[in-house]
Amino acid sequence: METVILSKIQGVFESLSESEKLAARYIIERPDDVIHYSITEFARFSGSSEATIYRMCKKLGFDGYQQFKIALAREVSFPAEAVVQTTGKQTTRDVVGAIFAENIGLIGRTREVLEAETIEVVIEMILNARFALFFAVGRSAPIAVDGSLRFSLLGIPSASYTDPHAQVMVASGLKQTDLVIGVSHSGMIRDLVKSMEVARDSGAKTVAITAGIDSPMTKHADAVLYCGTTTKGPSYLVTNRIGELVIVDILYKLLMLKTGPEIKPHFESLSEVLKPKRF
């Protein structure tokens, strides 16, 4: 998989030390400048140190600063996606266009960091599971609910739990034949990390859907599906979750293709059951 440097930095940002965040923030804000700096110049301009930059490069999976800089130069040679600006006079059409560009860019970054091999592993885990449960909290909760409903449409026993206490109680009774899919954009939510840990300790298989590369949640996952992330904003409340929604959609449609003719009678039966619900 080709490395996407800026997305990777944004994914690991919250797990970096404060001094490493200085260097990471500088890269996110001024990648075109960084590719021309020596490690000494970069340390001076970012307010960090050469040792800090070296550690950060290692955390990003590079042997050193030079290898990192070459990869970054390759990435920034492509035009950056437009993002919504909060300053200057803009029409509604401008803002709507920028939002569409941001979402399209985020889906593109999700495509770049999502590994087909891992998706195949997760599909097999779902098909072999007795129950496929979704765990999430906060703004990720609707994604978990959507995922469990989609799986149920396919005849896969599924449910979603968005209360941390309920998650732990359910997780403690799971078996080796069960699967938990945790959804967290940052991968840093303590309650969800604990729920994943309990589920895995009980013997269940675990999958993480997150933008948080090497985040605490991934340490308790048998497989990780990474999604793209937006540039860090002033609050997590504005962080876009479309990458996670796309991953759930991918799983749903691949499962539909995998089950093939078996799913048609189920859909027909489900359609009859739902008829009285419609006008």
Image (cartoon, rainbow, N blue to C red):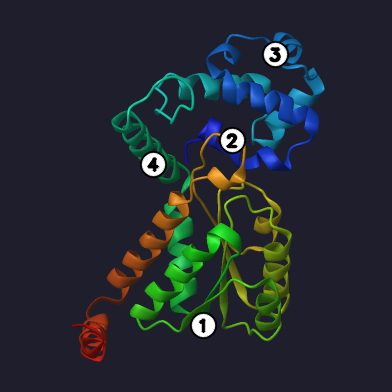
Amino acid beneath label 4: Asn
Question: Disc 3 or disc 2, which is closer to the eye?
Answer: 2
Residues tagged 1 and 3 counted as in contact (Cβ below 8 A)? no
**Nearest the eye: 164 or 13:** 164
Q: Secondary structure at mark 2?
A: loop
- SS for callout 1: loop
Q: Is residue 16 left or right of residue 175?
A: right
Looking at the picture, how far across and down is residue 275, in whole percent? 21, 87
Say what secondary structure mark 4 lies in.
helix
State the image quarter where residue 124 is shown.
bottom left
- CB atoms of marks 4 and 1 within 8 Å: no
Q: Nearer the viewer, mark 3 or mark 4?
A: 4
**Which residue is disc 2 drawn over?**
232
Sequence-wise, the earlier of marks 2 and 4 is: 4
* Direction from residue 270 to residue 147 in the image, left or right: right
Kindly identify which numbered label has been placed on residue 42. Answer: 3
Task: Name the mark nearer the viewer: 4 or 1.
Answer: 4
Instruction: Judge depth for marks 2 and 1 and give the one in front.
Output: 2
Q: Residue at x 18, y 83 (%)?
A: 279
Q: Amino acid at mark 2?
A: Lys
Measure the alpha-carbon separation of dots 3 and 4.
Answer: 31 Å
Q: Horizontal and vertical percent for residue 19?
A: 79, 28
Q: Circle 4 is placed at which residue position?
A: 103
Give me the residue at 53% from left, 36% from top: 7
Element at badge 3? Answer: helix
Residue 56 disc label:
none
